[in-house]
Image (cartoon, rainbow, N blue to C red):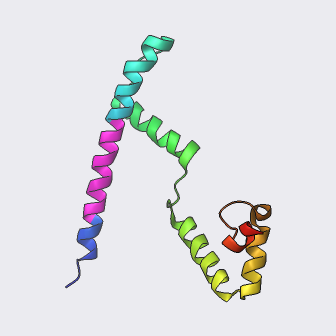
Amino acid sequence: MGRHPILKGIRIAIFVVIATIVFGFIVKSLWNVLIPPIFGWHTITFWQGIGLLVLSKILFGGFHRHGGGRNRWRQRMKDRWEHMTPDERDKFRRGMRCGRGPFTSSAETQI
């Protein structure tokens, strides 16, 4: 029997809420411990900490799924590699890094 998708959604929502609360308190605490003594700025509240967390996510991280693009790229490269002839694979290896690095075969390094 599979798990119900509604229960899975509820668990994910609870995890997101708990993670947001924890990270909000971490941001608030780090700000209040570091920034006022160093720069003389004011302390912040929990909600301002959440706001900083969301702002930093927007500016520096975006809201995309991490790793999904890399997996698609890796699968696409694997498919291309499997469709190459042995000669094309050798040419590819020689072209990578001008014959240096991990893409060279042992036969090329002996020459």
Q: Position of residue 68 (x, y in %)?
A: 52, 67
Give the vertical position of 59 relative to 105 (above or below): above
Q: Position of residue 109 (x, y in %)?
A: 72, 66
Choose between 110 and 80: the one closer to the eye: 110
Please name the residue shown 35% across and 37% down the image: 24
Which span is picked out in magenta? Answer: 10-24
> Is 3 left or right of 40, judged from the image as shown?
left
Please name the residue shown 63% across and 86% down the image: 82
SS assignment for the magenta stretch, majority? helix
Choose between 90 and 33: the one closer to the eye: 90
- Most extreme residue toward the left, as rendered? 1
> Is 34 left or right of 90, judged from the image as shown?
left
User: In the picture, which quadrant includes the C terminus?
Assistant: bottom right
Give the vertical position of 34 relative to 71 (above or below): above
| Quarter occupied by residue 60 | top right
Choose between 37 and 78: the one closer to the eye: 78
Q: Position of residue 98 (x, y in %)?
A: 80, 62
